[in-house]
Image: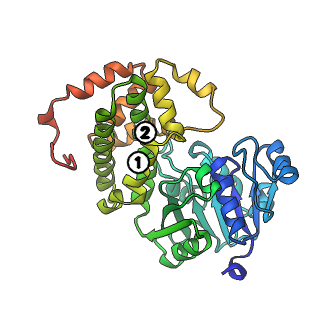
Amino acid sequence: MKDQIGRIAVVGGGSWGTALANLLGENGYPVDHWVYEKEVKEQIEQKRENITFLPGFRLSDNIVPSNDLAAVVSGKRMVLMVTPSHVTRQMALQVKDALQPDATLVSATKGIENETLLTMSGVLKEVIPSMTDDRLVILSGPSFAKEVARGVPTLVAVASKNAKRAQAVQTVFSSSYFRVYTNEDVIGVELGGAVKNVIAIASGMIDGLGLGLNPRAAVMTRGLAEMRRLGVKMEADPRTFSGLAGVGDLILTCTGTLSRNHTVGMKLGQGKTLDEILSEMKMVAEGVKTAKSVYNLSRKVGVEMPICHAIYKILYENLSPKTAARQLMSRDLKKEFSGEWGRK
């Protein structure tokens, strides 16, 4: 497999991109790693560490950092995109001419574009004319970058319409501590990875308000119902949301102290403004922008998502977290099917 794949390109020098580049390097693959910041390139070259975004971890000698995007992508049979969702379109525009015609493009970005309401696979296909479902693979699931870098046992999912490409990605990424499962439900895996970040903000808000563990469990459970409702409407396989890319990722992001989205919610609950919170963060909390996308997408397709709508209003319409919590508790249950999945 190493001879067949050759050098792998990783686009994105944040914590997740660096952790995945390191995983591939440890698996024996030579990795050309595009990073935006010159100082990050120098850190990896000189100290074998991404001090800015993933400090404390020595990186594989197989990683070659670069600020030259075209050179990193050119001639590669496999290209991994790990950039924030709001710059994915811009990055795709820059890589499209350098992509090899038959290259497998792996997206490890979780989000929905604000302007178009497209998932990342939709953005990539729209920007890159030659990109088809047959060449795209989505990687998602419960996986904090720091724990992957530390070698903590981790299970993720990869989805593609092309089973052979999904299996190739599975083989390349699998290691003694990183286990990869495959399926064909691209939209389900993408929606799970995106919506769980919004629910994680709600979970953090509950913790920040000091409301206790009961309401956090309620937010997670009803949040899963919202995620599944949207997925079913978008023709995803409902079983996906019971797996790693659904409930697995939701549990991790709603409860893990390493979750940036949970941190945003907690600080909102403690009374900080969104501007104050974001000014203190080096890395992107995807749920902040995705909340707007989920709000607009759910209204467009006619899906009831009260928790996600509440988070949108907190972030963008100055609704207070305490008021939002009261409103959610006083919702008219006659308007919402009260069964396990909460389907309309």
Q: Which mark is residue 250?
A: 1
Q: Amino acid at mark 1?
A: Leu
Q: Is residue 203 above or below residue 88?
A: above
Q: Is residue 110 left or right of residue 93?
A: left
Q: Amino acid at mark 2?
A: Ala
Location of mark 2 (residue): 200
> Between disc 1 and disc 2, whose residue precedes?
2
The reply to whether residue 224 is visible in this rendering is yes
Q: Is residue 26 above or below residue 318?
A: below
Tell me if mark 1 has few (under 14), some (14-19) or many (20+) residues whose alpha carbon lies within 10 angstroms of its own.
many
Q: Which mark is residue 298?
A: none
Q: Look at the image and tell me in which quarter the N terminus lies.
A: bottom right
Q: Viewer-proximal residue, 303 or 271? A: 271
CA gap between label 1 and label 2 equals 7 Å
Residue 130, position as x, y percentages in the image:
60, 67
Q: Viewer-proximal residue, 125 or 293? A: 293
Residue 336, position as x, y percentages in the image:
17, 39
